[in-house]
Image (spheres, rainbow, N blue to C red):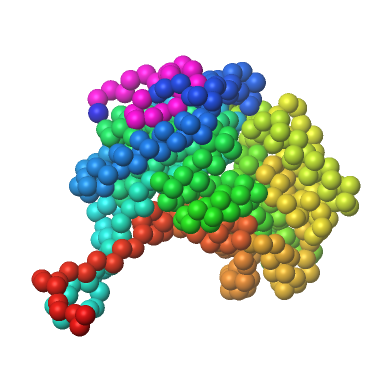
Amino acid sequence: MGAPETLSLFDAAPARGHVFDRGQWRPARGGARAVHEPATGAVLTHAGIANAEDMNEAIGHAHAAQRDWVATGARERAAVLLRAAQWLQAHFDELALLIARETGGIVPKGQHEVKEAIQICQIAAGLPMQAQGQVLPSVPGRLSIARRVPHGVVGVISPFNFPLILGIRSVAPALALGNAVVLKPDPRTPLSGGVIMAEAFKHAGLPAGLLQVLPGDAEAGEALVTDPRVPMIAFTGSPAVGRRIGELAGRHLKKVSLELGGANNLIILDDADLDAAASAAAFGAWFHQGQICMASNRVLVHEAVAAGIRERLVGKARHLPVGDGASGQVALGPMIDARQLQRFDSVVKDSVAQGATLEAGGTHEGLCYRPTVLSGVQPGMRAFDEEPFGPVVNLVSFASDEEAVALANTSQGGLAAAVIGRDVARAMAIGEQLNAGMVHINDQTVNDECTNPFGGPGLGGNGSAVGGPADIDEYTRWQWLTLKAAPPAFPF
């Protein structure tokens, strides 16, 4: 690919309120909105805000482009994905810093997003080369085939917290399998969640119209979800918005893949290594300020070791540095915006009013919220019943394995769960009873790899999964095809 050019994504056309349509940046009809760096409040760029008319036009272009793309050879599609991975690798450091600044994350978080995006593209490049169906048993003289065919246009709606990963994990496999994609990233993170992908695939030679990128609000999202030319929607975000999208998609008879959140439980048994368990709980609850759908938002601790775990977590909370994540000097950065911080702060304060004890944290400077520890958390408190989406360890005590399972399953499902204890058989027996899409033994809940199916039941999603072996199932559908040498005679 030669030497990489210097990127200027903060100052490029997207910074003037554009959307990406047919391989070019054009002004958004819905106007522009300032995007602020959470750590400093400085304006980084301006997101183009798509309206329903923008979305309708972009879907039409994607629908038209997909007809030629599905007829493109598997090796050609694979090559585009590999070139996109190469472009991301060539700009690794600059993109990682951009993501850290725009999302309020620390630089290793930005590096993680770029690394995973590269691997997702590389793995997706292998999908077109896999078998796409089966030969079925049938009557003599007839060839019967069950084959996988693309949906056509896939709508992807992605969030602010890990915008590159949570967008490209649908964009890359959907494109690789012959679909066009219309991507609506969160307008708070349009560069990480949209512009990076648009530029990567543009430089990779993806034909114009196959990836359309339109940041926007509910108007654009509803236009995407309700358009009959978009038979599948992949959404990552809150359960409340997920319910709305599920209702709209069901009304329009669409396939919908929902990755939401719900309650994620980390269970610490009485035989656990307390130092290791406390470290795992701290990372699972506080990494990226707890703004992770897999965050360890409930830490269930056996009463025999509850005091020891609490003491260790309070010590960590009081000493972890908080500030500008891009500086390289802190463990926690700022939350994404004031609205998110205020909601989280109300969860903490309301839970204390309901009887929880504030052991550490509970304060903030600007958007930087101190790592927080609440003890005595119980069902009926907001910190137990809701997904906090902020940097808090909610300590819940239990007396028996049966009680731990009952407490963990006091919800409508979740994405992830974990159990820590030296007796692996006991931990496994508990883990097998948890209503979660992913279960980790002797680890915390924030785990993901490009090769694993990612999803959960209930509030974790709708039982669907993306990634690894799930991708062909998600982004294609079955079609039955039969072939005879000549039409038979029928008795009519």
| Corner quadrant of residue 161 | top right
Residue at the far bottom in the pictured view: 491
Residue 434 vertical position relative to residue 111 in the rendered view, above or below: below
- Give percent across and percent down for residue 431: 60, 68
Residue 105 vertical position relative to residue 416 in the rendered view, above or below: above
Q: Residue at x 89, y 47 (%)?
A: 353
Q: Is residue 65 left or right of residue 389?
A: left
- Give percent across and percent down for residue 392: 72, 45
Work out whether residue 365 or residue 330 is closer to the camera in this orientation and state it. 365
Please say whether residue 481 is visible from this viewpoint.
yes
| Corner quadrant of residue 272 | bottom right
Q: Residue at x 26, y 47 (%)?
A: 70
Q: Residue at x 58, y 30 (%)?
A: 188
Q: Residue at x 31, y 39 (%)?
A: 64
What secondary structure do most residues of the magenta stretch adopt?
loop
Please say whether residue 123 is visible from this viewpoint.
no
- Give percent across and percent down for residue 33: 58, 23
| Corner quadrant of residue 171 | top left
Residue 275 vertical position relative to residue 28 in the rendered view, above or below: below
Quarter of the C terminus within the rendering: bottom left
Residue 312 vertical position relative to residue 97 in the rendered view, above or below: below
Magenta segment boundaries in residue numbering: 2-24
Quarter of the N terminus within the rendering: top left
